[in-house]
Amino acid sequence: MRLLFLFLLLGAQLAQAQQALLLDTYGTYNSTGVRRQVADAFFYGGLIDSNEISRSLSGLQKRNTFGLQMGLNAQWQTPWSVSKDAQKWGFSYKWVFNAGIQQYAGLQFSKDLFGMVFQGGLPYIGDTLDIGNLRAEATTFSKIGIGFGNKASQSTFVLNFVAVQRNLAASLSKGSWYQTPSSAQIELGLTGQAKFNRASGQAYGLSLDIDYRFGSADSTSNEQQFQLLIQNLGVARAVQSTSYSMSGTLQYSGYSFATWQQSSVEQLAQAFLDSLGYEQALVSNWILLPAQIQLSKIIDPESQQRLAAYYGAQFMLRQTYTPLVYAGAQLKVKQFWRTGIGMAYGGFGGLRMQAYSAFQFKRSQLLLRSDNCTLRNGASLYLQFRCDI
Amino acid sequence: MKMTSMRSFGILLIALTLFSCKKEATRWRTDWLLPVLHDTLTLNQYYNDSTLSINGSQIDVNLSRTILDLGLSDLIQIPDTTIAQQYQANFTVNNVSPGFMFVNSIKTHELDLGDIQLKKVRVSSGQIQLKVYNPLNTAVLYQIELPGVMQNGQVFVQNYTVAPGTVQNPTIATETINLSGYEIDLGGLQGLEFNQLQSKLTLKTDPNGQTVSIYNNQIFKFEAAFQNLRFDYAKGFFGATVIAGQEQFNLPYLDLITNGSISLPDLDLGLQIENGFKMALRAQVEELSATNTQGQSVSLNAPSIGPSMYLAPATGSWNTLQPSTLNLQFNQNNSNIKAYLENLGANQQVTYQLQPNPWGNTSAGHDEAFANSRLRIKMNAQMPMALQADGLTLQDTFDIDLSQDLQKSHVTAATLILDATNAFPFSCDIVLYFMKDGQVWHTVIADAQLVSALQGQVDPSDGLLKKKSKLKIVLPPALVANLQDLNQVAVSANFATTDPGTGLAVQQAVQAHAFLGLQLQLQLQTQIRP
């Protein structure tokens, strides 16, 4: 989503600029059902009120998502052509350097699991809780890359070296929790697996960032200008990840005096894990980076049209992310100030309103945007800055 | 342009700072109910094992304990002993031809067994380690014979060919032989002596060796070390040494009683002294006393405590062995046995003397002991399982480690919930003392009593009188806040056999198959801090 506005800025860059520096930072979280007040507590701290938890719970569907994306990216579009020979293709391209750090976290969870985590098991005694169909994906990685950009179309192609700092891929295909009202006996069934890679477990790879523009070169023609943006398309190899798996059932109604006397807490905990078929191992594995693919219509900032429409769609190679579609209109308030308003649906959340403002100065541009103005279960802030030198 | 860019960058920084500002920890409250304990306390494991027995709808205490149990190996022992035999020429013998047998003699060894005079023993376990030394410059054939040591009619004979050696470095051959099953005749050459062991050493130079000279500084010897000998038969005079002893033992649970009293029904306590050796025996129970947890001691007073008593030798042998026994009976009429037991003495102490052959060697060395010969003191008691408890308090202390970091997820409130089904005829009040290094910081009392089965109804499914109770023990917030400092909890249970009609403590019999079913749950309120 944020890339839409990056396109807006990129489209607005001055053709005559020798070189440009682009800074792009963003932070967003959203959910299909968890109220913003609950999620905010994880970012700003504080007590999550039980009333807020109850309200969130009542708004949840059987399956829900929550996601978080944060990142900081810098790109330097150099003045140096790939080739000095005007007869060669490289003359039309200039070198581009790129560096950034990004974090993706996505969670799919059941309403019952949310209730158990945030309210405990006591309110659900006598109910069978479905805590399965849980999926958690989280990746933090940094990248540094080199590529080339077309001087005329502003399309860029960058190959990045990627270092994954942390990666988690976990799923719980089956999960149930039941406590009998008479004795509080716990009946737990879990089937799932996870792979976790810490910063200490080295994981390196390559990724490709493609910004391809097609359609009309400017707004004077009747054709629209579009962009196909592919980012973080690549993989990394983790040499030492920890793999966890679990498949089993457990019934626990308390231990006898003899068991408590003869066993340590560690032994009892291990017995629990054994009942659940818990296994742990060190493995090597490939990590698929959270690649995103976006197709969107771009608005030409030089256009004299006061009102223009934008729209697009975005996909991510993540099971916790649903395809995102958005559409809206932009109003050119002043020559240096454009503002837009629109709607978005998908990603980590439901239907919500977005708004942005872009300011264009003599040699720089600044954009601020939020995707959660109303109808919101999250918050987001996008800041982009471009300086043409 | 530069100012504009700086301004924009400033806005960016401020926005980022605000976004990342986190003032306090994220936290929320959850409530849990966790099962902790699920058990049924019964007396089943004590039925039919000489402790309890079912008698109709009642339980009888049929306590039988062996206080002392001595066997043959405890009374008759040969300490680890080494015997040696050697040959040394008085003068030089030259030109000794191969195959020359140059010594053949028998030696008798005396065993030091104190006042015990053994004529014969049979080894049940143990070993002999043989070591032979050859200082001659040709191989020597050693034959070691122990004439009194036999197995299946065969005399113990071992042959060794020991390689050539020197005076300074004689060649040594060593072997360890299991003596299990060997009989050892300690009667000497004529069979009339005791504690005597014979050996015979025969030496022969190597028939295929060279002609050698034997010098007077060459010592030919063997050593036989008897190790860890245990016997399953012994004959002789077993001595008259007094075995004086003091045995102490603790009765379980009685050491947990801190207060209150009980009243028991009339009972008989028997003490049986058993002599499984074919020898006369003097037995004397000098004192039988018990000390309770308050330090109060009561000694058992009875005519048979103190004076010596004499037991005849056992009769028969091996499988037909019949021990002689002496039975002492303590009851209300001849002792203070009731007061002795109602003192609830956890620490029991018995002081005794046992003396074999109190009149000396009257059997002329014909004392006998077999594999199944025992000297035993047994105690047995019989009474219906009934008691009257009035404020009988059992208290036990457990170490706990419930430390928690209040800056992380932690418990903010807790309640223990006890569901009990009681088929015993007593009620129980529970108090918990939470302590730090023995100092009580918090006292928590259950909100209700574990009610006696006497106030319940007969369950038609099993015919037992039983009563259900539900107790809550709420741990106050101050206690929960101190959990990380507390390291001990004392559980105090106050029992009473109160008559529901009169409210007075009365003696109550425990019904057969009585049990106490317990389900303990822990209700927790937690603050989660991810």
Image (spheres, coloured by chain):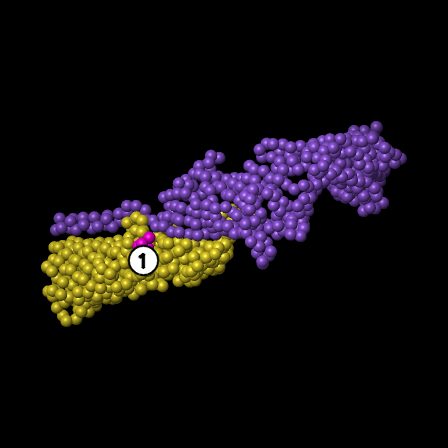
Chain seen in yellow: A
Question: Which of the two residues, B176 or B307, is positioned nearer the viewer here?
Answer: B307
Tell me which residue sits at (27%, 58%) in the image. Answer: A377
Q: Residue A386 in the image: x percent, y percent? A: 18, 55
Vertical placement of residue B523 versus B149, above or below: below
Vertical placement of residue A157 versus B169, above or below: below
For mark 1, name the chain: A
Question: Which of the two residues, A312 or B403, is positioned nearer the viewer here?
Answer: B403
- The residue furthest front is B502
Q: Can see residue B425?
A: yes
Q: Can see residue B108?
A: no
Vertical placement of residue B117 versus A222, above or below: above
Crowding around mark 1 (Cα neighbors within 10 Å: few <14, some 14 to 19, many 20+) is many
Q: Name the residue under label 1.
A: A56
B502 left or right of A347?
right
Question: Which of the two residues, A235 or A37, is positioned nearer the viewer here?
Answer: A37
A110 left or right of A277?
left
Tell me which residue sits at (30%, 45%) in the image. Answer: B24
Chain seen in purple: B
Tell me which residue sits at (29%, 61%) in the image. Answer: A349
The prevailing secondary structure element of the residues shown in magenta is helix
Q: How many marks?
A: 1
Q: Residue A358 in the image: x percent, y percent? A: 16, 58
In this picture, which residue range is highlighted in magenta?
Answer: A50-56
A242 left or right of B354?
left
Residue type at the position of mark 1: Ser
Tell me which residue sits at (14%, 56%) in the image. Answer: A359
Question: Which of the two residues, B516 or A252, is positioned nearer the viewer here?
Answer: B516
Asked if residue B209 is among those painted magenta in the image, a careful observer would answer: no
- The image quarter containing residue B234 is top right
A41 left or right of B168?
left
